[in-house]
Image (cartoon, rainbow, N blue to C red):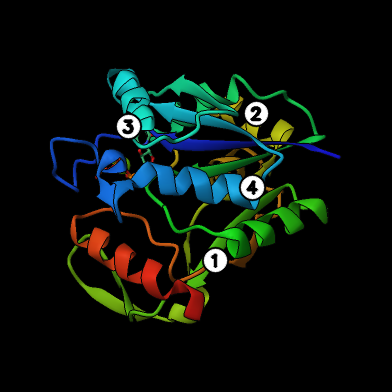
Amino acid sequence: MKQIFVIIVAAGSGRRFGSPLPKQFCNLAGRPLLMHTIDAMRESVPSSRVLLVLHSDYISLWHELCQRHKFSEQGIDIVSGGDTRSQSVRNALANVPCSADVYVLVHDGARPLADHAVTTRVMQALEAGDAAVVPAIPVTDSLRHVSPDGNSDAVDRSNYVAVQTPQGFRADILHKAYDGSDAATDDASLVQSVFPDIKISITPGAAYNIKITSPTDIAVAEALMRTRSKF
Ligand code: CTP
Ligand code: MG
């Protein structure tokens, strides 16, 4: 059986969320948002080792929160984050063997609703031999391409998908991608920039797998948690 590492990146400052406390520690349905994210991933991939990436300023707060909420830190290793999301992933990858027999899931700490259904689809694609797997959902808004001169043209949204996490990779591929570069907004884009011939496999994500970005997303997430079983 392959070894599985789950990297949860939670070292951002949450600038767009705008609260003094970074969003990943804010309350969601009675406990810090990040605890929902970790539990969801631990339940989906119970045999995995979790690498939790935190900004060094917040590591002691995190331990306090775990005590206060009786949240088990067993099986979780904490890694210090970097200035960008990519650097945070890179710091965590330093703890992952560079092997084709190891899988890595990289997940945003700010996505507390990724569940078994989404994660299992990503894992199944890895097990079927795909080296890089991205969950994604159809775009529902109409899209326009805006040119630098301000003119815009309608584009066919059926050609586009919105990308989510957890993204899954063979560890050797992700390592080599990060050896080559570290500037991309998501890990699959980085893999593709370093390995243009690798197929990025797309698997269905879920509309409820939102990323908490602004405070209103907390209310949306709480509503989704109440109704998710109906999806
Ligand atoms: N992240 C990280 N290290 C960074 C920046 C981001 O680990 N230096 C993490 C965030 O904590 C988050 C995930 O990457 O879980 C997705 O990033 P995003 O939603 O953009 O969060 P922030 O960067 O914190 O928010 P903002 O962009 O609004 O500042
Ligand atoms: Mg950010």
Contact check, label 2 and label 1, Cβ < 8 Å: no
Sequence order check, earlier mark of 2 and 4? 4
- Residue behind mark 4: 168
Quarter of the figure with the N terminus:
top right
Q: Amino acid at mark 4?
A: Gly
Sequence order check, earlier mark of 2 and 3? 3
Q: Amino acid at mark 1?
A: Gly
Q: SS for tag 3?
A: helix
Q: SS for tag 2?
A: helix
Q: Residue at x 66, y 47 (%)?
A: 45
Distance (Cα) linking label 2 and label 4: 13 Å
Sequence order check, earlier mark of 1 and 3? 3
- Residue behind mark 3: 68
Q: Residue at x 52, y 51 (%)?
A: 40
- Residue behind mark 1: 205
Answer few, some or many: residues within 10 Å of disc 1's Cα (few below 14, many 20 plus, some between 14 and 19). Answer: many
Q: Amino acid at mark 2?
A: His
Image height of 161 relative to 51, above or below: below
Residue 205: give x, y in percent of width and height.
Answer: 54, 66
